[in-house]
Image: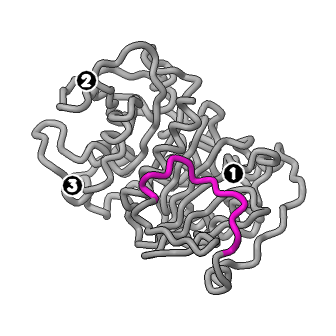
């Protein structure tokens, strides 16, 4: 377990067994019982563990937030002529043993729509907190096909919407733009659709980025939840893994309606994952990097929104050092937290439980 007595947020680094000081050890499996991940006042366990950490970055100087927002907006803001009438309609309802579902169709651009799936806790009474769960397509987030109930084994362990519905959250997830922007005969999991959709987006809107489109579509899902009378719009959160982690991080940092963000193994640092892909930043990434853009700046733009990082493969201990550069968390460093399970890309159950507890802390209490 790694932490610093003078650090503002806690990091859990999971191994088979690890020391926590005072001669005590704890098994990684016991972390499933943790409800809060912030750890303070712990001594370094040993020099070997301490050696895993890079030098902690010093605080960035105060930055002009308006200028910072403009710098990011150059790449992320919806183009001025990207005009359409916001609308949505209920398509169908579904009942599952532990939650109910609603499938909506929502306008997400000039002449395009996205499917949005809502999950509702059984026996819902009054307004409930809600979480947006972006990913490739929403069925993956409930773990099965809507029409048949057939399990989606490829996405086993990632049924985040189902998990959160059991905890009393309303959730929403939509198709990503590789399924909505350009017409295609390819299947939803054919990765060539991403390159085709990104090429079409760049052709139509050459100053925009794929990550800007992903964030914009995700914020439309936030619109849908915020307008739903069953949702407490003051208790909205967002959670995503991998691609969904990128979407959650960007949309959550840029939308003040989001009160808590969880992102799993999305690549906090530019070189940790495929940010250069055409469907994210493409050939605009070198320009963004040359302008000094860093992801801690998005946390600064969030105004101190609570953020929980699940690191595993792409994200590492260095991601937490970058998080620590974010401004706006002074005096409330417990709003920055995370877990480094270091077991690969997919988050294990105990990491998800810690993240869910983080959401409950900021959206239910």
x and y, in percent, of residue 16 in the image: 43, 76
Report the residue at 56% width, 48% height from top. 36
Q: Secondary structure at mark 3?
A: loop
Q: Are marks 2 and 3 in contact (CB under 8 Å)?
A: no
- Determine whether the residue tagged by mark 1 lies in a helix, strand or loop: helix
Q: Which residue in the protein does label 2 denote?
A: 91
The residue under label 3 is 187
Q: Classify 10 Å Cα crowding around label 2: few (below 14), some (14-19), many (20 and above).
A: few
Q: Nearer the viewer, mark 2 or mark 1?
A: 1
| Residue 17 in sight | yes
Residue of label 1: 298
- Which corner quadrant of the image does residue 88 belong to? top left
Q: Identify the mark nearer the N-term, 1 or 3.
A: 3
Mark 2 and mark 1: span between their CA atoms?
35 Å
Q: Secondary structure at mark 2?
A: strand
Residue at 69% x, 65% y: name it: 42
């Amino acid at each position: 377990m790694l932490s610093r007595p003078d650090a503002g947020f806690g990091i859990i680094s999971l191994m088979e067994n690890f020391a926590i000081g005072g001669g005590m050890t704890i098994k990684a499996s016991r972390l499933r019982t943790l409800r809060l991940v912030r750890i303070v006042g712990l001594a370094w366990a040993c020099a070997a563990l301490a050696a895993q950490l890079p030098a902690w970055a010093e605080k960035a100087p105060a930055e002009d937030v308006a200028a910072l927002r403009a710098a990011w907006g150059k790449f992320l803001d919806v183009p001025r002529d990207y005009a359409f009438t916001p609308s949505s309609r209920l398509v169908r309802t579904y009942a599952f043993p532990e939650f109910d579902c609603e499938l909506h169709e929502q306008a997400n651009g000039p002449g395009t729509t996205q499917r949005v799936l809502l999950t509702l806790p059984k026996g819902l009474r009054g307004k409930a907190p809600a979480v947006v769960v972006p990913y490739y397509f929403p069925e993956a987030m409930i773990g099965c096909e809507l029409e048949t109930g057939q399990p989606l084994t490829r996405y086993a362990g990632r049924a985040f919407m189902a998990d959160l519905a059991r905890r009393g959250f309303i959730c929403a997830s939509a198709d990503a733009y590789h399924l909505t922007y350009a017409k295609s005969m390819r299947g939803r999991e054919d990765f060539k659709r991403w390159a085709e959709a990104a090429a079409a987006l760049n052709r139509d809107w050459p100053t925009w980025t794929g990550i800007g489109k992903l964030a914009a579509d995700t914020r439309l899902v936030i619109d849908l939840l915020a307008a739903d009378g069953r949702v407490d719009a003051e208790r909205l959160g967002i959670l995503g893994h991998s691609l969904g982690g990128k979407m959650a991080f960007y949309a959550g940092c840029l939308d003040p309606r989001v009160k808590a963000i969880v992102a799993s193994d999305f690549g906090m640092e530019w070189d940790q994952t495929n940010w250069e892909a055409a469907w994210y930043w493409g050939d605009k990434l070198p320009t963004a990097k040359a302008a000094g853009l860093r992801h801690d700046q998005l946390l600064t733009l969030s105004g101190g929104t609570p953020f929980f990082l699940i690191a595993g493969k792409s994200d590492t201990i260095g991601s937490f050092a970058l998080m620590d550069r974010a401004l706006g968390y002074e005096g409330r460093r417990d709003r920055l937290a995370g877990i480094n399970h270091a077991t690969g890309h997919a988050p294990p159950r105990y990491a998800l439980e810690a993240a869910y507890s983080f959401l409950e802390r900021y959206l239910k209490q």
